[in-house]
Image (cartoon, helix red, strand yellow):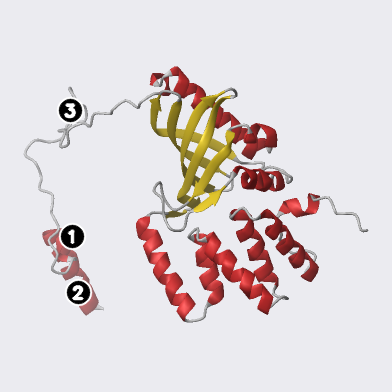
Amino acid sequence: MKNRKIVCYLICTAFILLGPAWVHAGKKVPILKATSKPASKRTTARTKPPTSRPSKKVLPRKKATGLPPQVKKAMARIIKTQKAGFLRHDFKTYMSLWTPTVKMLAGRGPKAGKYDILMTYQQIADRKAFEFLAKPEKNLQMRHMVKNWSFKGKQIMLQFETIMNYGTRTEIVVGEIYRLKKGKNGWQAYENRWWPVHRKVGMYVVILDAHFYRKMDEKIKRFKSKGMYWRYLELLAQTYRFAEARDFLANFVQKQPRKLRAWLMLGYMSLFTGHISQAKRAFRRAQAIFPNARVHPSMKLLKKKPKK
């Protein structure tokens, strides 16, 4: 007991004399020294804390009010038709934006690439007529941000970022370029190019830039060489190589016609590339294999052809 008391006494004495710095092995911990002037309870004047960083100037945002009137009209036309289509599934209003000779290009970025998908007016109409049979998303919200524009004569170029928020912590941002010309029906788009910018699911954000696609393309080659075809097909779909996936699946289902997953994926890849009749056939084959298969919701609302 005496030895314990002596040890405790020595430890307490060391702690009082040396302070908490001796506890940290080898680390220098600053010890506060007593000031000569005692701290007063009330301070007569408050001094401003020293500013180590200079204050940043906040630049004002460019407002849409600075756009020319014709550019404003074209911008309003795009927003109106897009919201009518995606939020209300109003087919007629949505299709009124496009000229009969429109070219819709989907790719990986604002510039042309080898994986671009081209859709004509008829393909756009067939796809939206099919998709708009289903009910629109309840929680979908759309916002548009103008990034760039030009106005020459009777032609306008508008670059947008469309933010689509699905309300379930899911957000998709799409870049778009519209080229419009003025005719009898007002401003109409004769060319549209869109590409994914980023997607967000919960706290997980994927930025779809050149670095992302380069990494994914390397994985696609590796999975294909190893014969890991389902991983290969999944990455083709995630990296917007829809046409390549559709061609592969069209050959695959001929060899394995009872593969449900292949028919479902073929249906969606055909839909995304504008081959609507092929998509419907693939979904029907999937339903024949398994009636409760996760086909597109519009399949339940299609009118059945009368039997002869």
**N-term mark: 1 or 3:** 1
The x, y position of residue 185, in whole percent, is 60, 24
What residue lies at 78% left-to-right and 69% top-to-bottom? 290
Q: What's the CA distance linking mark 1 and mark 2?
A: 18 Å
Of the pair 188 and 245, the residue shown nearer to us: 188
Vertical relation: 71 (above or below) 144: above
Q: Which residue is mark 3?
A: 48
Q: Which residue is mark 1?
A: 20
What residue lies at 43% left-to-right and 32% top-to-bottom? 157
Whether residue 43 is visible: yes
Q: Amino acid at mark 3?
A: Lys
What is the secondary structure assignment of the residue under circle 1? helix
Total numbered labels: 3
The x, y position of residue 41, in whole percent, is 21, 30
Of the pair 286 and 198, the residue shown nearer to us: 286
**N-term mark: 3 or 2:** 2
User: Which of the 4 image quarters holds residue 286?
Assistant: bottom right
Query: From the viewer's perspective, is the residue at label 3 or at label 2 nearer?
Result: 3
Query: From the viewer's perspective, is the residue at label 1 or at label 3 nearer?
Result: 3
Number of residues whose C-alpha sits closer than 10 Å to that of mark 1, classed few (under 14), some (14–19) or many (20 or more): few
Q: Amino acid at mark 1?
A: Pro
The x, y position of residue 249, in whole percent, is 61, 70
Q: Which mark is residue 255?
A: none
Q: What's the CA distance linking mark 1 and mark 3?
A: 32 Å
Q: Which mark is residue 7?
A: 2
Number of residues whose C-alpha sits closer than 10 Å to that of mark 2, classed few (under 14), some (14–19) or many (20 or more): few
Q: Left or right? Give the position of 294 relative to 35.
A: right
Query: From the viewer's perspective, is the residue at label 1 or at label 2 nearer?
Result: 1
